[in-house]
Each structure stands twice: as C-alpha cells, then as structure tokens.
Amino acid sequence: MSKLKISLKKVVGKKYNRFWHFKGRYRVVKGSRASKKSKTTALWYITNMMKHPGANTLVVRKTFRTLKDSCFTELKWAINRLCVQDHWKITESPLQLEYIPTGQKIYFRGLDDPLKVTSITVDVGSLCWMWIEEAYEIMKEDDFNILDESIRGQVEDGLFKQITLTFNPWNEHHWIKKRFFDAVPDPDILALTTNYMCNEFLDAADKKVFETMKKNNPRRYRVAGLGDWGIVEGLVYENWEEKEFNLEEIKKIKAIKSAFGLDFGYTNDPSALFCGMVDIEGKTIYVFDEMYKERMSNEAIYDEVTNMGYRKERIRADSAEPKSIDRLRELGLVNIRPARKGKDSVNNGIDYIQDFKIIIHPRCVNFLTEISNYTWDKDKFGKKINKPIDDFNHLLDAMRYALEEFIKGETFSFD
C-alpha cells in the first residue's frame, strides 16, 4: 500500500509548538477569534488518535445541542484537511467519529446530561483525552471537577491522560483564570494565550475586521482580538442566577405568561431569540431557551424558530428591521410584531427589568455570557455614565422587546 505523506507544518501552521507537544494533565488555551485554537485542537486529536491505537477522546460543551455545529464540524474539517476521509466513519446519530482501522472513537457529550458524561465505556483502549470547547460557558468549577474525575484509570504505555480547554476569555473573574493562569508553575499545566496575529492563514479582509474592531471597539478588541482577559466592572444586571428548573412546573404558576423577543443580526452580530416566562406577581423572569446564530437569512430564522417549536408564539422584534419582520410574517411567524422604540426606551426597559429576579436555565449559555458582561459605559475620564455599552446585548435587547407588553404606565415612556 502506498503511504500518504502529510506535512503537519504546512497543515497546522506555526505558533502552537508547545501546545502540540505538551503531555501534562491540563492544556488550557484562551484566545481571540481566528487564533486557530479550535482548528489546531481538532487537527491534534485526529492526528494523535491515528498515532496512538489505544486512545479515545471525549468532546464536551456545556450543552449538547451546540456540539454539532462547533466541535463536530471542526473535527470533520480536520479529517478533510489531513486527507484521511477514507479512514474515518462519521455518524450524526449518535454523534460520533470512529477511526476505522482500530475502532477508536471520539465521543460527544453535553454537561446538561451528566450521567452520559460519567458513564462512557470504550470498546478499544482507554478514554484518556478530553476536549472542553468554549470552556468559559462552564461557570461552576464543581462542574469541571466532575469532568476532570471522569478521565481516570490506567492507560497503555506511550499514552497519557490530558484535558484540553479552549475558550474566549470574556470575564477576568472566571474560575479558569485563578485555577490555571494564576497558578504557581506546575508541570501538569500549560496555560497559553493566542490571538489572530499567529494565524498565517488569514487574508487581508480577515485582518481588516480586527483592525476595524481595534478602532471602533477597543474593549472588545482586547478580548476578541488580543485574547486578553475581559475586565468587567459596573454590570447592568446583578439580579440574576443560573439555576435549573422544570418549564412545565413553571407554567403552572398562577398568571405566568410567555415572552419572546427577537434581535436581528447578520455578518458580525448574531440574530438572537429570547425565550422566557414572566411571573409579574412574583417579580421573576425565567429564561428557558435561546437562539443565537450569525449569518441567518430571514428564511433561516423562520426555519430555526419553527424547529424550536415557537412559530405560533407572540414575538416582539427589533423595529429597525421592518422588511425582515414583514418577511417573517409572510413565511409563517404570524404573531411577530415590531417593538416600540422611543426616547429612553433602553434605560426605562432596564429599570423595569432590574426589579425582577432573573432565573437562567444552564442551557442558555449565550444569555449567561451576555448578562455577565453587559456593563454601563464610561466617559473619557473613566467615569460610568447612565448608558450601557453597545456590546453583549443581543439577547438582552431581545429580552427588553419581549417584556414590552408587561411594562405599563409612566415606568416606560415612548414619547
């Protein structure tokens, strides 16, 4: 049989040498967008699974439903990039990749089903590697400890146990910073920061996106461009908690009402659907579901909302996009209506919502990220002003639209 020779240097690129060769327990990479961290990780797993016949990998995100369009897609890309398609069996039900010559597997699990995470039994070799993508979504260190403990037992000679965490570092108060980046030197920890400048595969148009961000939104550039920790001060909402709840039980609350809001995006901003239940008497908002995707046409939004089961719900949408609202109504979202925008509508809406307790289901990972990073803006002297930053606000704007019908009287003026 002829052998296919692949130049990893050309396929993977530069700046990840330490990452590629590290064999300690924890390999932790925070980085900007387009820093190659996810693609390099995917290439590493496909390459090393083929190199080590006894290795199996578990890929984890906080919610299972986000895996197919992220890690699963990245690993399929890596298989094609390495030109080894004929050696891998790819299945979507169950979500799984199998190295055909040996039967080794890459498993996919969500932390929203912990029993499935901790009860994996492999057919060949041992479960020795784990990739936690968007590890920032895991806000409780105890949840990570459960995952950490699942990589245990003896491994074959030449293998090693390792957990890789990749994420965007939005908030400096996250437990990952203290545990890995602020830790005393430890041979079992490799903590790296990467950014788009180490990605030689970007073209001029890609780089221009970051240069524009640097000019127009320095705060976001520090995190999404340079990979630095996000400094969060002056949160708009502090009246929230992450907590599991049973939606059917919530629906039994007297006078509970549903609330759906839609914020449009496209190229750089996501289209965001807020799905909540509002208990006016108990002053509680329950956030139970979300849509959060970029580059969605009106048709794609309609399909997604329909697939989520919310086609017949009353949806308040961003009134700045009347054509999109009309088109979505034509497609079948017959109860979509434009939000009423007016003078001080943002601040009045925030004032109203601040009187509620916001309970966020763990599956709503993007809502959790936004609400823990949505802050008041500052003037040129660094003093907070009574205006929120125009960032981390897509689902939060959608929440304001959704709650319009509950906001009455002088509390909310559109004059």
Image (cartoon, helix red, strand yellow):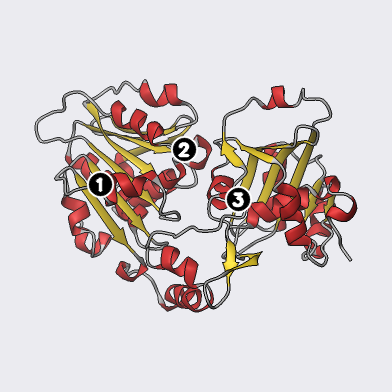
349 sits to left or right of 227: right
* Residue 208 visible somewhere in the drawing: yes
Tag count in the figure? 3
User: Which sits in the foreground, 212 or 51?
Assistant: 212
Quote the CA–CA distance across marks 3 and 1.
28 Å
Image coordinates for residue 322, horizontal then vertical, percent: 82, 63
203 sits to left or right of 265: left
Image coordinates for residue 9, horizontal then vertical, percent: 20, 62
Amino acid type, mark 2? Lys
Question: According to the image, label 2 marks what residue?
Answer: 62
Cβ atoms under marks 3 and 1 closer than 8 Å:
no
Q: Quadrant of the N terminus?
A: top left
Q: Which-is-in-front pick, marks 3 and 1?
A: 1
User: Which sits in the foreground, 274 or 301?
Assistant: 274
Residue 54 higher or lower than 33, as above or below: above
Q: Residues within 10 Å of mark 3 (few under 14, many from 20)?
A: many
Question: According to the image, label 3 marks what residue?
Answer: 292
| Circle 3: element type | strand
